[in-house]
Image: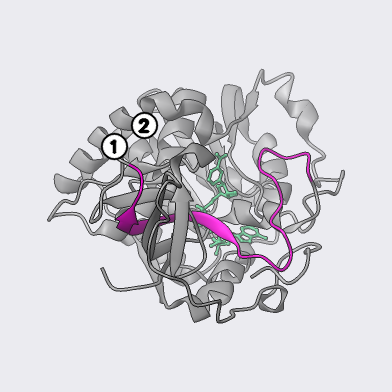
Amino acid sequence: ILKNYVDGIPKETDMEVKLGETIELRAPKGSSSFLVKNLYLSCDPYMRGRMRDFHGSYLPPFVPGQRIEGFGLARVIDSDDDNYKTGDIIGGIIGWEEYSLLRSSDNLQLRKIQLDDDIPLSYHLGLLGMAGFTAYAGFYEICCPKKGESVFVSAASGAVGQLVGQLAKLHGCYVVGSAGSKQKVDLLKNELGFDEAFNYKEEADLDAALKRYFPEGINIYFDNVGGSMLDAALLNMKVRGRIALCGMVSLQSLSSSSQGINNLYNAIPKRVRLEGFLQSDYLHIFPQFLENVMRYYKEGKIVYIEDMSEGLELAPAALVGLFSGKNIGKQVIRVAKE
Ligand code: NDP
């Protein structure tokens, strides 16, 4: 439950885990709704934007005193909707609670999940879910990559970044990632196949760090963090480079007008294209994404790193951990056994 609106980075104490009311585990007759038992919840940086009292974004704020919601996976246990049958596994927006009563007319981005013996169900929240899709849509649709180009990815070991880097490698690019610890840098180089990686927290001068890894400049910057890393990247772009503005997790305040960007001018002589995007605008290519990424995974061409928290009690800590880099890979919460 969100206790209060949040200013800046959320803290565990901004949320509380409460015993709710006892409910009858049935979907009321004539309600066109269906009842699900929640299995996995996804922790996503965008959720911070819903924890403040701001109505001008693409999603409305959460309501203090009410439960948080987000992407999750659940099993239908009773249904008054002919499209969803008992036993179906669904993905979509569900409550951060043990059971949710859902209505398909509520724009919950629902989809049925086909179980596959070779793919753990929870992967449908990351690699094969919203995060993976963000990487896929952002890389192919916004970055327009060409074989041999140089690609830089920030927050590279996270849910989105890890797939961007691996897709770029499959595309024949030179790929460098930044991350916030030695363990993550090792992961990028040794398991995720990045050509190079560095710990941005150990670099006094981000511009110098990028010049070290990209002496001839960057063709594509997939920006997950904004702020000083974006500013340094602007100094290192090649002519006609592309910057995909995916997210700005480094910003302490989402409402601040100062984003710490001083080097935007460089985009003019270098003819750099900066483009913000939302994965939800590209859902028409979701089936193509699912088919391709599932195949890459099964063929062993990509790997996937997931960070699983056990139990709703740990949900606030798991969500807050995204903003200090506690998660290693995609942060997921297991609410109940499958
Ligand atoms: P991650 O799994 O990457 O988790 C967030 C990571 O951000 C942390 O692990 C941490 O990694 C890094 N981070 C946290 N604070 C800072 C900071 N102050 N400076 C630099 N890095 C920081 O999250 P996702 O992969 O789910 O999301 C990545 C980005 O993509 C986010 O900005 C998110 O908002 C965005 N996004 C955008 C979508 C869209 O449609 N445009 C859809 C989905 C996600 P480290 O230890 O390396 O610092």
In the image, taking residue 197 as reference, residue 207 lies left or right, namely: right
In the image, taking residue 239 as reference, residue 337 lies left or right, namely: left
What's drawn in magenta, residue-wise? 55-81
Q: Please, what is the three-letter code of the amino acid marked with disc 2? A: Phe
Image location of residue 21, percent across then percent down: 55, 76
Image location of residue 56, percent across then percent down: 78, 39
**Residue occupying the point 41% across, 42% down:** 110
Image location of residue 326, percent across then percent down: 53, 72
In the rendering, which numbered label is found on residue 290?
Answer: 1
The answer to whether residue 10 is above or below residue 189 is below
The answer to whether residue 307 is above or below residue 284 is below
**Residue occupying the point 70% across, 67% down:** 10
In the image, taking residue 70 as reference, residue 292 lies left or right, namely: left
**Residue occupying the point 51% across, 35% down:** 279
Quadrant into which the N terminus falls: bottom right
Ligand 1 within 8 Å of the CB at mark 2 = no
User: Can residue 98 be spotted in the picture?
Assistant: yes
Query: Between marks 1 and 2, how big is the CA–CA gap?
Result: 6 Å
Q: Is residue 75 magenta?
A: yes
Disc 2: CA contacts within 10 A as few (<14), some (14-19) or many (>=20)? some
Name the element at disc 2.
Answer: helix
In the rendering, which numbered label is found on residue 278?
Answer: none
The answer to whether the residues at label 1 and label 2 have Cβ atoms under 8 Å apart is: yes
Q: Quadrant of residue 238?
A: top right
Disc 1: CA contacts within 10 A as few (<14), some (14-19) or many (>=20)? some
Give the camera-side residue of 64 and 311.
Answer: 64
Name the element at disc 1.
Answer: helix
The residue that disc 2 covers is: 286
User: Can residue 158 be spotted in the picture?
Assistant: no
